[in-house]
Image (spheres, helix red, strand yellow):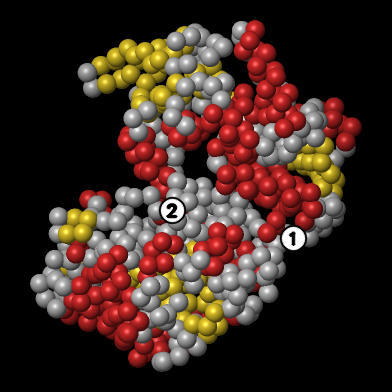
Amino acid sequence: MSTQYPILGSPLQVNGVTLKNRMITTSMSPGAGYVTKDNRPTQRLANYLEERAEGQTALIIQTICPWKRNEIDPDHIHELPSCYDESCIPDLQRYLVEPVHKHGGLICAQPYYVHDWKPDAETPEGPYGPSDIAILKFMGGFRAMTLEQIEAFKQQFFNAARVCKAAGFDAIEVMAGVGGILSRFMALATNNRTDEYGGSLENRVKLTLEVIRGVREAVGSEFPIVVRWSPVDFIKSPAGPGLSMEEALRIAPMLEEAGCDLHDLAVGWHETSEPLTTKVIEDGHWTFISQQIKTVAKKPVAQGYRNTDPRVMERNLQDGKMDVVAGLRYSIADPALPRKVMEDRTCDMRLCIVCCRCLDDVVSQGKPLNNCGVNPRLGEELDHEAFPPAQSAKKVMVVGSGPAGINAALTAAQRGHAVDLYEEGPRLGGCVKMSSIFSPYHERYLDYLLTQVKQHPEITVHLKTKVTPETVRQAKPDAAIVAVGGKPLGLDVPGADGKNVVSSHDFLEMINGHKPAGKKGALNSFMWGAGSLFLSMYYTPSFARTMTEKSPWPIGRSVAIIGGGLPGCEFGHLCMETGRTTAIVEERKKVGFDVGGSDRFGLISGFKKAENVEMYPLTRVTAITEEGVKAVQTTPEGDKELFIPAKTVAITLGLAENHDLGEACKPLVNEVYLVGDCETPGRIADATKMGYRAACAL
């Protein structure tokens, strides 16, 4: 039994099954590659589920489709494993149930009833609900269900439950949250019916209760029924508000009376405008909801959303705020996290960094689940074993220690190669050393990476070593993986080299103990030199974060940020939070043009609400002076000249590829791979996957 996580690692009885710990995964729709175009599960999905079962996840909840889909999705993004009749059972057993049971795990089926539905073979698939009310214009077109369709809906659900039990699933989940059909019935905001399914709370909950009772009759008394629902909706419409906590406290006992064995609590709907899952929400924040539901619930309560740190999970369990931790991203990031919890292996936990890449791909863009900031094994990587043993051990030189380089080094070493990892600066981490200043989640990922490198006997680290072609020639590696990062994009305008101008690369240079070149002014130049020397010896992300927040140098109390992409927005958020007067200047139409869909709304709306932030889209910088920035903004009325006062001008234009060292290595080494930003500038998930792929190709 875990000593660090005594409750998180402890078992829990839920009706006829025993959860081996308190960590369950919420449902998902992983998309193309995991499911075929004709809605059959693939070996990739089986491998994904098996990794998490082997990692000791207590209960894996998997979305499945309870109707036969005749329409072929041209983008191949919404396919789900089918469960519409007995013909689906062999595939469900082979690819879902057996891979989980192989490791003593439990798997729960969730028939998919979010927006789209197909009541019969002839009717086209489409969005249904109690009424034709849409919360968002682009998520509209809802068809009000007739009483005959409601009956068909129930019978379809009951049939799916019988099929899933026959296939060997261990539980069934009723989806009654996040804006799905049942949650739309429960909320006044989307239900203006005047019949038995509308009006009073009892009427609005009636369909959900009928579904639960019918499922209970279909599966028997000892088969667990999980109910996923949203006690707080964070939505409204002219028809009325969403669910309130007052109503939710009345609903919870009704669900249990109907047959609910476990409350799986979500927060909000897909249409909710409040940030729910991004890093602006603290870990464990939403447990105030489960804490209130527990005051009336007699069955266990699981809380989902923003559960990534097992220490926070354990504290909330001990405080009685929930009984079970529900989530998906912690499991995407580290399939073995529950096992590590039960074995007290805190230092080996690869925790989610809340980059939201998985959500951006799957939810915002309708892409398959192929990317994670910290876990490269998603998508086609799941088609082969994690660390295939090398056919012959090689001497591998890895140049650069960012996420691409370290993941390449760890993967190559795990496969049996001897790895030399080179870093020009005094410490490992690459760009994560800098991003950790802005994100504690990146800081804990950096700690994880450093721990893994330190623990691996096949990795030799070379710090303060600038790799040149001569270094490569002397080392004589069998293979070289070059991960030196991209070249920072500069700004070619008068004053761009002024003493009040800083760039993101300047900070990385300073962290690496190098005084950035070209710093004007005697005092300014001295400060950069002294700062570089100091940080080379005493840098920690938290210390640098504190200095950035409080020190008037090198970031003054008024800042103009040139470049409104992700780096500029993240730096702008830090400036906003620390009370600096902040201007974000971007040539494109939108500030935050490359920020993922999960983060963008909350980030940009935060800028709009802040009194100390101004955004300047469609604005081109023409010059920088000691007093600020000269620019031209394109408006409907024509170009307009601007002057933006600023003590500090920060250039955050991103990176360009950097092939120089990689190309120089090719005549010297048999195998050369360029990975990370030096090959193709991108997000941390791209670098992580590129490093892993290169090491697997050796």
Task: Read off the residue under disc 1.
Answer: 388
Q: Give the x, y percent position of residue 100.
A: 58, 76
99 vs 585, left or right, is: right
The one nearer the camera, 154 or 307, is 307
Q: Quadrant of residue 3?
A: bottom right
Q: Disc 2 on helix, strand or loop?
A: loop
The one nearer the camera, 16 or 391, is 16
Give the vertical position of 609 relative to 618 (above or below).
Answer: below
Q: Give the x, y percent position of residue 543.
A: 63, 35
> Which numbered tag is attached to residue 515?
none
Task: Read off the residue under disc 2.
Answer: 277
Name the amino acid type tagged 2: Thr
Whichever of labels 1 and 2 marks the residue nearer the N terminus, that label is: 2
The one nearer the camera, 62 or 697, is 62
Q: Is there any visible trace of residue 42 in the rendered image? A: no
- Identified at 67% across, 70% down, the residue is 2
Q: Disc 1 on helix, strand or loop?
A: loop
How far apart marks 1 and 2 lie (CA) works out to: 35 Å
Give the vertical position of 463 relative to 235 (above or below).
Answer: above
Name the amino acid type tagged 1: Pro
- Identified at 73% across, 46% down, the residue is 450
Q: Give the x, y percent position of residue 621.
A: 42, 16
Q: Give the x, y percent position of residue 618.
A: 35, 24
